[in-house]
Image (cartoon, rainbow, N blue to C red):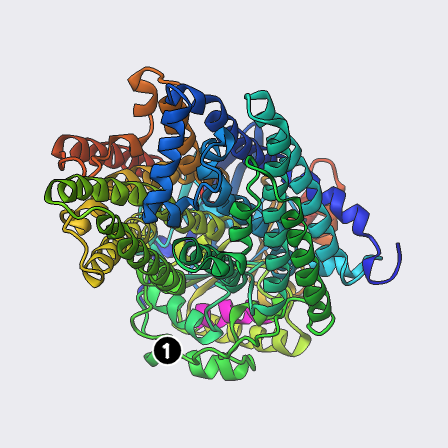
């Protein structure tokens, strides 16, 4: 290979080597999620009739359809088994591939490593090309593993192949989105925000389409995931849409790449203030300043999703209009809210993890050293991170709850209880996950990255324990399992207090370690 | 200006710091008197940065006695840091903050007031554009941000770890002037550097570190006798360190 692509093979090999552990673990978790669902589903239903009724129940509740997408073929076992995976967990697939592409392009440029690489006999487009080749290889691997795993778990082989392919398609489109975002954004950080916004928009458009005009679902790549109808009668031609869109996005990215400088985006970085505000004077104000934009974007995102689900959930009430049925549906509405909140809590945990991970990056880059060389104690440094991580995640749950409530009120839905309280019930569990990440950071900066695994690990633990009816203590390992599903369940001070004690104990150990350890 | 007790800014005796089984510092002695510029020399990996990080309370000493401005750098870190400033050799800044914001933040975190500091004068002298975001700065410009923040409040002690790496010759001159003014006020400097000519011009005494120990401890630079380059090479070439002839200069 020559020209702007020279060195692509070498860079691809390097990328695969750097990602070996992280990519294997992520792909392993994703495959495991599919396999556990595939294995467990038959045991959940006594006969085909029960299974079909369950699928019909999903289709009848707009909130679940908004969250998971509809089950287009209610008679298919695979469609039901993969109902959570088809769209909702495909978002995790998309996130993984956005992270991979960004990591080998803009992050490398910002670190200065790309300059070193660019000075050698490596072409200008080679880093992007290498990231995309890696994405294609890993997407193919993911598709194969999922297809084989699901087939071995007892699902239809043809459907499993189609399902693996649609996940790979999602991965390719996500890589394409990231490829464009890294050209446009002014920094590696804003590029993550652009890509996340694009994936989020695809999800919302699909949710709107699946619960409203169907044509809208077809405008979203995540909508195609449902329309493939992998385990029904697969529409193979839909699978062709993903590569077409991915190639278009990559073509746009390639054109844009030739029009921008290394380390710069198409959106020019704005100059900053000559002087620092007197409000920016310590680790807490610094942490608030650094995470301000991210917190604002998160707030808008969870607020919008909250309103969306709040508006959709009470729609169940329209189906039956008798007094007794309304009462049943109020309870059902409560369950829907609980399902939505359980997903949002895991997602919001990632905000807390990202804040702590940022503290780890600050340390490895030497910025923590600058702060600690000033008259700032370790206690205040750690407290700055804690306030933003814990306060920020609690704030986001509050916004989610307020969004749900607002959505309910907008559509005059039946009252299902205090949704803000229901959302806040998840705060202690999210804090336990945050505290675990802080503990990793406190043990050694290098271990902070382990924090990214906790929410996924607990999710897998809960799923596996529930699906295989394991002893209660297995599911209880996850802090999320202890949360009372308000409003369907009663608020439980015992459980909430227990989680708070665990979080406080973890933070205590973390502090004990952090104040004594070497920095950097 | 408040004088450190005992007339010494830094007092290190038999400092040991291990990373696993590797002893980065193996019984280091270092003494910086109040009001002197002390050169701290040694090749890459000799333990210069590790020493400074122990002095900042970032690393915990495994053995030995360390006193900084009359206090214990590990225990009294935040209080002591109000009286000193540090410039690392490889300055990493928050990409989204402008240079001006970063300077003011660093000054405020030492409990200084940017408005009453020499910040504007130094920004001018170092020809720094404070409106640029840190991600757009070159290495030299990041270095200037840290230097301006460190020098602006006239601290009692400057801990400088290869502070001129990345600076152009003009800016190196500005830096030399600033260190001269700093010393004229009676303040102290620990200047770790590879640039022998810079150390020779600025320092009153030098300590040369080799494999975690002082090969030459507190040698006065009088301007006569063998040049610093000769002292440095002797300290590294001879298996047992420098001969008595050099140390007795």
Tell me which chain the residue with mark 1 is part of: B
Give residue A332's quadrant in the image.
top left
**Residue A245 on image: x %, y %:** 65, 58
Looking at the image, residue A373 lies above or below residue A422: below
B168 relative position to A372: left or right: right
Q: Which residue is mark 1?
A: B117
Is residue B134 something that shows in the picture?
yes
Quick check: A254 left or right of B70? right
Determine which quarter of the picture holds residue A303: bottom left
State the image coordinates of residue A264 (x, y, percent, origin top left): 63, 70
Give the percent coordinates (x, y) of residue B218.
Answer: 55, 51
Q: Is residue B82 visible?
A: no
Residue A5 in the image: state x and y as whole percent.
Answer: 82, 58
Image position of A333 with respect to A462: above or below: below
Residue placed at 87% from the left, 62% from the top?
A3
| Disc 1 element | loop
* Residue with the most extreme right position: A2
Would residue B146 be counted in the magenta stretch? yes
Give whichever of A439, A414 is nearer the camera: A414
At x 38% / y 57%, what residue is drawn? B7
Q: Residue at 29%, 30% (x, y): give it.
A: A481
The answer to whether residue A416 is left or right of residue A360 is: left
Seen from the viewer's position, the closer of residues A366 and B155 is: A366
B232 above or below A297? Answer: above
Q: Is residue B122 magenta?
A: no
Q: Is residue B96 left or right of residue A340?
A: right
Magenta residues?
Answer: B141-151
Majority secondary structure in the magenta region: helix
Looking at the image, which residue is at 56% across and 61% down?
A188
Q: Quadrant of residue A396?
A: bottom left
B227 to A468, vertically: above or below: below
**Which of B128 and B61 lies nearest the eye of the viewer?**
B128
């Amino acid at each position: 290979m020559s020209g702007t692509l020279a060195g692509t093979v070498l860079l691809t090999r390097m990328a695969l080597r750097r990602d070996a552990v992280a990519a294997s673990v992520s792909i392993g978790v994703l495959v495991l999620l599919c396999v556990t669902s595939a294995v467990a589903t038959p045991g959940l239903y006594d006969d085909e009739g029960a299974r079909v009724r369950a699928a019909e129940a999903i289709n009848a509740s707009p909130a679940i359809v908004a969250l998971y997408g509809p089950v287009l073929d209610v008679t298919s076992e695979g469609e039901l088994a993969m109902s959570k995976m088809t769209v909702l967990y495909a978002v995790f697939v998309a996130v993984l591939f956005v992270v991979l592409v960004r990591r080998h392009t803009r992050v490398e440029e910002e670190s200065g490593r790309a300059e070193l690489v660019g000075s050698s006999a490596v072409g200008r487009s080679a880093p992007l090309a290498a990231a995309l080749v890696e994405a294609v290889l890993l997407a193919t691997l993911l598709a194969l593993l999922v297809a084989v795993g699901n087939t071995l778990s007892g699902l239809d082989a043809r459907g499993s192949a189609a399902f693996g392919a649609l996940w790979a398609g999602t991965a390719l489109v996500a890589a394409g989105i990231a490829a464009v975002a890294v050209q446009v954004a002014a920094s590696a950080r804003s590029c993550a925000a652009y890509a996340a916004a694009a994936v989020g928009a695809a999800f919302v458009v699909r949710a709107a389409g699946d619960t409203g005009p169907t044509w809208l679902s077809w405008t979203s790549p995540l909508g195609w995931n449902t329309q493939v109808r992998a385990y029904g009668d697969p529409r193979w031609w839909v699978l062709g849409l993903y590569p077409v869109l991915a190639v278009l996005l990559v073509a746009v990215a390639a054109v844009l790449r030739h029009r921008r400088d290394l380390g710069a985006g198409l959106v020019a970085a704005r100059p900053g203030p000559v002087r620092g505000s007197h409000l920016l004077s310590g680790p807490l104000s610094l942490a608030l300043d650094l995470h301000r934009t991210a917190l604002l974007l998160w707030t808008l995102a969870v607020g919008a999703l909250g309103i969306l689900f709040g508006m959709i959930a009470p729609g169940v009430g329209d189906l039956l209009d008798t007094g007794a049925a309304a009462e049943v549906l109020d309870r059902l509405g409560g369950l829907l809210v609980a399902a939505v909140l359980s997903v949002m809590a895991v997602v919001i945990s990632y905000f807390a993890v990202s804040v702590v991970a940022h503290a780890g990056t600050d340390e490895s880059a030497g910025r923590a050293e600058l702060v600690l060389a000033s008259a700032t104690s370790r206690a205040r440094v750690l407290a700055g991170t804690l306030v933003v991580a814990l306060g920020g995640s609690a704030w986001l749950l509050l916004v989610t709850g307020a969004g749900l409530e607002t959505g309910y009120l907008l559509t005059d839905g039946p009252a299902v209880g205090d949704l803000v309280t229901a959302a806040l019930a998840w705060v202690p569990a999210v804090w336990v996950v945050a505290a675990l990440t802080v503990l990793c950071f406190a043990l050694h900066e290098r271990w902070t990255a382990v924090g990214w695994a906790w929410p996924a690990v607990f999710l897998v633990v809960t799923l596996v324990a529930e699906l295989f009816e394991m002893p209660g203590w297995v599911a209880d390992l996850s802090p999320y399992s202890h949360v009372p599903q308000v409003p369907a369940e009663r608020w439980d001070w015992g459980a909430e207090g227990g989680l708070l004690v665990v979080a406080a104990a973890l933070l205590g150990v973390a502090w004990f370690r952090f104040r004594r350890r070497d920095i950097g | 200006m408040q004088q450190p007790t005992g007339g010494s800014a830094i007092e290190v005796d038999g400092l040991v710091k291990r990373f696993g089984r590797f002893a980065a510092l193996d019984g280091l002695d270092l003494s910086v008197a109040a009001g002197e510029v002390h050169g701290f020399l040694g090749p890459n990996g000799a333990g210069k940065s590790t020493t400074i990080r122990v002095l900042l309370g970032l690393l915990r000493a495994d053995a030995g006695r360390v006193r900084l401005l009359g206090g214990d750098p590990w225990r009294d870190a935040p209080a002591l840091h109000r009286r000193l400033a540090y410039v690392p050799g490889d300055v990493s800044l928050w990409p989204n903050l402008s240079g001006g914001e970063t300077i003011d933040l660093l000054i405020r975190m030492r409990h200084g007031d940017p408005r009453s500091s020499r910040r504007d004068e130094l920004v001018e002298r170092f020809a720094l554009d404070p409106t640029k975001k840190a991600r757009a700065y070159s290495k030299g410009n990041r270095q200037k941000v840290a230097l301006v923040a460190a020098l602006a409040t006239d601290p009692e002690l400057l801990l400088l770890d290869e502070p001129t790496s990345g600076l152009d010759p003009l800016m190196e001159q500005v830096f030399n002037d600033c260190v001269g003014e700093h010393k004229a006020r009676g303040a102290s400097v620990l200047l770790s550097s590879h640039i022998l000519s810079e150390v020779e011009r600025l320092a009153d005494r030098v300590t040369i570190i080799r494999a975690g120990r002082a090969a030459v401890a507190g040698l006065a630079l009088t301007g006569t006798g063998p040049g610093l380059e000769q002292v440095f090479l002797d300290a590294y070439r001879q298996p047992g360190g420098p001969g008595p002839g050099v140390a007795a200069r």
